[in-house]
Image: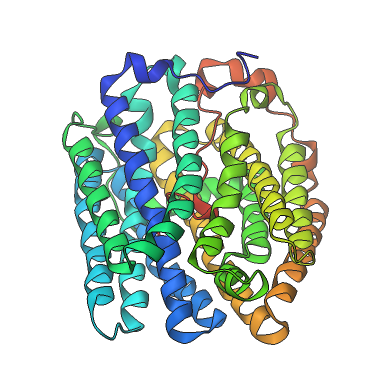
Amino acid sequence: MAQLVVDIAPLRRYPVFRRLWFGQMVSGVGSQLTLVAVSYQAYRLTHSTLVVGLIGLVQLVPLLAGALWGGTLADAMDRRKVLILTQVAMAAAIGGLAVNASLLHPAVWPLFVCTAASAGFQGVDWPARRAALPMLVGPDDVTAAVALQTTIQTLALVAGPALAGVLIATIGLGAVYGIDVATFAVALVAALLLPALAPSGGGTPMGLRSMAEGFRHLRKEKILSATYWIDLNAMIFGMPRAVFPALGVGLFGGGAGVVGLLYAAPGAGALLGSLVTGWCSRVRHQGRAIAACVVVWGVTIGLFGIIPVLWIGLTLLALAGAADVVSAVFRQAVQMRTVPEHLQGRLSGTFFAVVAGGPRLGDAETGVAAAIGGPQFAVWSGGLACVAGVAVLLWRVPEFWRDSGGGAALSDAAHQEAIAEVISELGEGEPL
């Protein structure tokens, strides 16, 4: 049983990691408050699921640019400085939402502008944070440290949205945004207390040449590329969060509280799943495990779209979240065993662009599908498309099914970073 439960030893052994972990936990909850608040406010102002989806879409370009540029930045300069600057920038972006919400007649356009800015800065933050982790703990503790970060992200997925529904109904949207700004202050203090985190060997000069080197490695590693494509498939077609406000208010006849529960349910499942990921390091065929998890995700999302019973829907979303976090473990394990240290920042940036950009494309796809056939149609059709996408990928990349690089290979000291951080694709401590 001990092998299944998350290991908290790095929190005891490394005070610097403990502070960073705590700051990330607090800011992750704050980000979830804002995620729900933005979607709920947009739907209340416009009564349009399409607008909710488009808010996610406009974040895509700054997020991709931030992640790709941030990856080269993380491999070129002190990662501590990057983390400090991004906390300040993200707090300023969310502050704009708080000011807008305090107006007598809030406008819709700040929801687009401020969330797009936050997404761009979050894209810069992620690769620096990810690449800094192995520098804060010993080689034998990296796996446990990543698993601990996964756990707090999934905890934020549960606590943040559930709390958001209550807070929006009681203290209002402006105060909720204000709380998120305050959480970035906690994360900023944690970053200020870090030691210098310069890349090994002095770093690689940032720029297009550095970025291209990362893309060349990704292109060469077919199994690694397949993990990106299968996650994009799951998030574009099977991420139904853009219709949560419409379903919560319309189909389930609730208000902000029910909407918060819908956002929280996948995170609840992810949290439970992340607590029992110890067995993952013993799985050799990681490609097959990822494919199975994505099929489970697609099937449960599809069922959620056709069963109009709230408690059943929440259960299905939780199952989907559990499948997603296990998939994330294996996807990150593949990255850790196929990417050399000097490319970790750039490939972490690309990884973040995929896992955080996919849901934004999914928001747009879901919004368009809902405009055509209604919210439930958007959900079940996306679930079916997700399952079909897995079949197509296995047909086009058979090496993915035959992959046998996991299991015992993970015990090697060079492959100690197997447990993944869940990104945010669930809404997770991710950008807005």
Residue located 60% across and 50% down the image? 266
Residue 191 % position (x, y)? 22, 38
Q: Is residue 71 visible to us here? A: no
Of 228 and 25, the residue lying toward us? 25
Q: Within the image, what quadrant is residue 323 found in? A: top right
- Quadrant of residue 312 in the image? bottom right
Would residue 97 appear left or right of 253 to someone viewing this image?
Answer: left
From this view, report whether residue 259 is shown above or below residue 158.
Answer: below
Q: Is residue 426 visible?
A: yes
Relative image position of residue 249 (x, y in whole percent): 58, 73
Task: Determine whether 275 is above or below 392 in the image.
Answer: above
Report the quarter where the C terminus lies: bottom left
Taking the spot 51% from the left edge, 46% from the top edge, the residue there is 158
Residue 81 lies left or right of residue 343; in this view the side is left
Q: Which of these two is toward me, 346 or 116?
A: 116
Q: Quadrant of the N terminus?
A: top right
Q: Against 291, is 64 above or below?
A: below
Of 341 and 112, nearer the camera is 112
Measuring from the top left, give residue 3's x and y in whole percent: 62, 15
Q: Who's the residue at 16% across and 37% down the image?
A: 192
Is residue 243 left or right of 350 when viewed as pictured?
A: right
Which residue is drawn at the image coordinates 79% and 58% (left, top)?
Answer: 387
- The residue lying toward the viewer, choosing from 325 and 120, is 325
Above or below — where is 228 with respect to 258? above
Q: Position of residue 359 (x, y in %)?
A: 55, 62
